[in-house]
Amino acid sequence: MVETRKTSMSASPKMAREKLSTTVSSETYQFLQKMVEQGNAANLAEAVDSVVARIRRLENRRRLADATAQYFERLDPKAEADEHELAEGLSAAAGAIDFDTDI
């Protein structure tokens, strides 16, 4: 069972945090603890936040990829031709940029 309640912890003085009391598998605990030991997180709470943030980014990327695919699947031929022309122009312009020195 997961319990939540608002609390202000010192992990981030600007952000109110939710209290989460739960149990996890031994493997998960060891993974989170290793993140702390390696300096990738200050404590277990920060480790959990970091892992959840990664998962959320992956989910957002998946949703964006799905939405992009749906957009292109539904394009009428004229709009598809316009998109193709725009992509070629952007590709050519990007090819002229030396990213090591220009940006």
Image: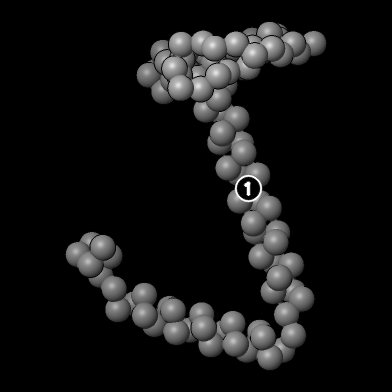
Left or right: residue 31 versus residue 70 is left
Q: Position of residue 78 (x, y in %)?
A: 68, 91
At a point 60% along the width and 30% down the height, the residue shown is 52
Q: Quadrant of the N terminus?
A: top right
At a point 41% along the width and 23% down the height, the residue shown is 40
The answer to whether 67 is drawn above or below residue 43 in the figure is below
Relative depth, front residue between 48 and 17: 17
Callout 1 amino acid:
Asn
Q: Quadrant of the C terminus?
A: bottom left
Q: Position of residue 69 (x, y in %)?
A: 69, 66
Q: Residues within 10 Å of mark 1 (few under 14, many from 20)?
A: few
Left or right: residue 91 versus residue 103 is right
Q: Position of residue 30 (x, y in %)?
A: 55, 12
Dividing the picture into quarters, in which one does residue 29 lie?
Answer: top right
Relative depth, front residue between 3 and 51: 3
Residue at the farthest right position? 1
Q: Which residue is mark 1?
A: 60
Left or right: residue 50 versus residue 59 is left
At a point 39% along the width and 82% down the height, the residue shown is 92
Q: Position of residue 32 (x, y in %)?
A: 54, 17
